[in-house]
Image (cartoon, rainbow, N blue to C red):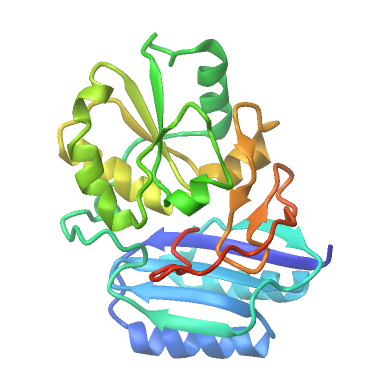
C-alpha cells in the first residue's frame, strides 16, 4: 500500500482564513494531494492522501507556521487515493456543535491515552476504583460499523444532537469516570468540555480517538471496523481498508472528524 492517508486537527484561533485557504490549496495542488481541509475561526481539520514524499512535504510546510508547529497527524495506508479531488473549505466550526461557548483552544479537558484506557477496561475500573463508562460521540451510521460494545450510544444523526442527549441522561454518570471517544479526537474533545461545563466530574477524552487506540493497542475491547469519511468507508483494527461497501448517502452527511 503506497498511499498515505493523513488526518489531523487543531483548535487554534485563525483570523486570516481566505489567505490561509489559498496558501494551503496551492500547496496541496502542487504536491498532487487530494482530500479536504476545513478552516474556521476555531481551527483546522484536515484529511489528505498522497505519496509518502508529498505528505511529508505538506506536513513540513504546515509545521513552519507557528500556529501549527505541534499539530500531530494520524496516518494509515491504502492502495488507492480515497478522495476524488482537493478542497479547502471555510466553515463556522471545524466540527459543528453550535455551542459557541465551547472553546477548546482555551483549555482542553483531561485526556486518557489508549494504553491506559485499555488497562482500565481490562481491570474494570480506573486507577481510583471508579467504574468507567465509555461514551460514543459519533453518529449512528458510524457506530453501526464498529464500536466499544459496552459504550453508551445515543444513536444521534448529527453531533448537534449531542448536548440535548447528554443533558437528559446525566444521572447515568454520577460517581463514575466518563471517557468520551470518536474517530480521531475532535468530537470527543468538544463533548468532554461540554460535560465539564455541565458540572460533570471525572470526564476524560480518549487521546487521538479510535484510530490511536487501534494503533497503540492490540484492539482488545473494540469490535468491528472504524468508519472514516472517505472512499475507504472504514478501516480495520490494523488501520487497513476494511473493504465494506459505501452506505447510501443521507442528507447532511459530510466529513466531520479527524
Image height of 88 relative to 41, above or below: below
Residue 126 spot, x, y in % from top left: 43, 16
Q: Quadrant of the N terminus?
A: bottom right
Image height of 94 relative to 128, above or below: below
Residue 180 spot, x, y in % from top left: 39, 37
Residue 254 spot, x, y in % from top left: 45, 69
Q: Residue at x 63, y 61 (%)?
A: 233
Nearer to us in this view, 47 or 103: 47
Q: Residue at x 33, y 76 (%)?
A: 91
Q: Which residue is drawn at 66% across and 33% down?
A: 219
Residue 67 spot, x, y in % from top left: 40, 67
Q: Residue at x 52, y 76 (%)?
A: 36
Dividing the picture into quadrants, the one containing residue 215 is top right
Seen as rendered, the residue at the extreme right is 1
Dividing the picture into quadrants, the one containing residue 169 is top left
Image height of 82 relative to 89, above or below: above
Amino acid at each position: 500500500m503506497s498511499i498515505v492517508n493523513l488526518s489531523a486537527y487543531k483548535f487554534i484561533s485563525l483570523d486570516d482564513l481566505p489567505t490561509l485557504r489559498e496558501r494551503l490549496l496551492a500547496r496541496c495542488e502542487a504536491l498532487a494531494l487530494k482530500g479536504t481541509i476545513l478552516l474556521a475561526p476555531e481551527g483546522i481539520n484536515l484529511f489528505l492522501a498522497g505519496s509518502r514524499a508529498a505528505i511529508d512535504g505538506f506536513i513540513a510546510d504546515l509545521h513552519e507556521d507557528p500556529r501549527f508547529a505541534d499539530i500531530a497527524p494520524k496516518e494509515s495506508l491504502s492502495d488507492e487515493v480515497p478522495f476524488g479531488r482537493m478542497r479547502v473549505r471555510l466553515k463556522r466550526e471545524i466540527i459543528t456543535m453550535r455551542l459557541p461557548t465551547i472553546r477548546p483552544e482555551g483549555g482542553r479537558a483531561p485526556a486518557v491515552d489508549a494504553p491506559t484506557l485499555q488497562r482500565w477496561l481490562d481491570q474494570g475500573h480506573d486507577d481510583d476504583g471508579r467504574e468507567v463508562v465509555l461514551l460514543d460521540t459519533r453518529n449512528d451510521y458510524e457506530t453501526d460499523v464498529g464500536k466499544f460494545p459496552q459504550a453508551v450510544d445515543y444513536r444521534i444523526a448529527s453531533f448537534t444532537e449531542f448536548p440535548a442527549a447528554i443533558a437528559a441522561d446525566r444521572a447515568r454518570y454520577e460517581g463514575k469516570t466518563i471517557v468520551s471517544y470518536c474517530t480521531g479526537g475532535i468530537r470527543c474533545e468538544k463533548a468532554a468540555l461540554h460535560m465539564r461545563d455541565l458540572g460533570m466530574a471525572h470526564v476524560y477524552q480518549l487521546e487521538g480517538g479510535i484510530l490511536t487506540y487501534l494503533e497503540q493497542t492490540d484492539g482488545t475491547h473494540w469490535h468491528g471496523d472504524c468508519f472514516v469519511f472517505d472512499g475507504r468507508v472504514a478501516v480495520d483494527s490494523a488501520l487497513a481498508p476494511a473493504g465494506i461497501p459505501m452506505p447510501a448517502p443521507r442528507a447532511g452527511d459530510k466529513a466531520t472528524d479527524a
